[in-house]
Each structure stands twice: as structure tokens, then as C-alpha cells.
Amino acid sequence: MNVVENWNSANHFIFFGRSGEITKNQPEEQEIAILCLHLLQNCLVYMNTLKIQHLLKEKSWRETMTPEDFRALSPLIYSHINPYGEFNVDLTQRLAL
């Protein structure tokens, strides 16, 4: 239940325009809105998974984590996301992809 609630709150967060509601009556417009949400969801989970994997490659992090910590890992986090269009990018470094 917590996973579903977390996913729904993430959806509401990233699909924030017009209170997260699909306001169009045209099926084509609704489909585009849902497909955009799916794209955002996939990008969020993919980037979070890459970041978690990169972090877990460091031995110091792995050694400090308990089995409960590993069970609680989830790519459904979004507190580090800014949905309002401001992106601080350091062009001197590459993303660890």
C-alpha cells in the first residue's frame, strides 16, 4: 500500500499542471497527456535507478547499509526533483550514466 501511495504522490508531483487532472475532452489530447506522464515516470525511475546503482558501487555505502535498508530501496523518490523548470547543471562534469 505504501508503494502505491508513494507512486501516486510522485505522479501528482511530476504531473502538476492543472492540479494533475486531464482537462481535455478529446481522446487524442488525453492520450498525449497520459503518454507524457508515462515518459516522465520512466525517466524518473531510470535516473533514480542509475543514481542508486552508482551510489551502491561505493564500498563505504554498502558496508553501512543493513538488510532493512536494502529492502527499503526504491527508485520512486522525487524529493530531489524540481518540476518548475529550473535546472542547475554543471557542464564541467558528466552524469554517471
Image (spheres, rainbow, N blue to C red):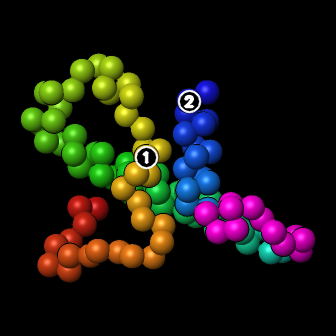
Residue found at x 73% / y 72% = 32
Q: Is residue 75 left or right of residue 38?
A: left
Q: Is residue 43 above or below residue 27?
A: above
Q: Answer whether residue 18 is magenta in the image.
A: yes
Give the secondary structure at mark 1: loop
Residue type at tag 1: Ile
* Residue linked to disc 1: 77
Q: Quadrant of the N terminus?
A: top right
Q: Position of residue 93 (x, y in %)?
A: 16, 73
Q: Magenta segment range?
A: 16-27
Residue lying at 41% horizontally and 60% vertically, measured from the top left: 81
Q: Residues within 10 Å of mark 1 (few under 14, many from 20)?
A: some
**Mark 2 = which residue?**
2
From what the image shows, is residue 50 above or below residue 40?
above
Dot 2 crowding, Cα within 10 Å, few <14, some 14–19, many 20+: few
Residue 20 left/right relative to 79: right
Considering every residue shown, the one lying at the far top of the view is: 67
Q: Residue furthest bottom?
A: 91
Q: How far is the residue under mark 1 from the one under mark 2?
A: 13 Å
The C terminus lies in quadrant:
bottom left
State the residue at coordinates (80%, 75%): 29
Secondary structure of the residue carrying numbered label 2: helix
Q: Is residue 90 left or right of residue 5?
A: left
Measuring from the top left, give residue 4's x and y in whole percent: 61, 36
Badge 2 amino acid: Asn
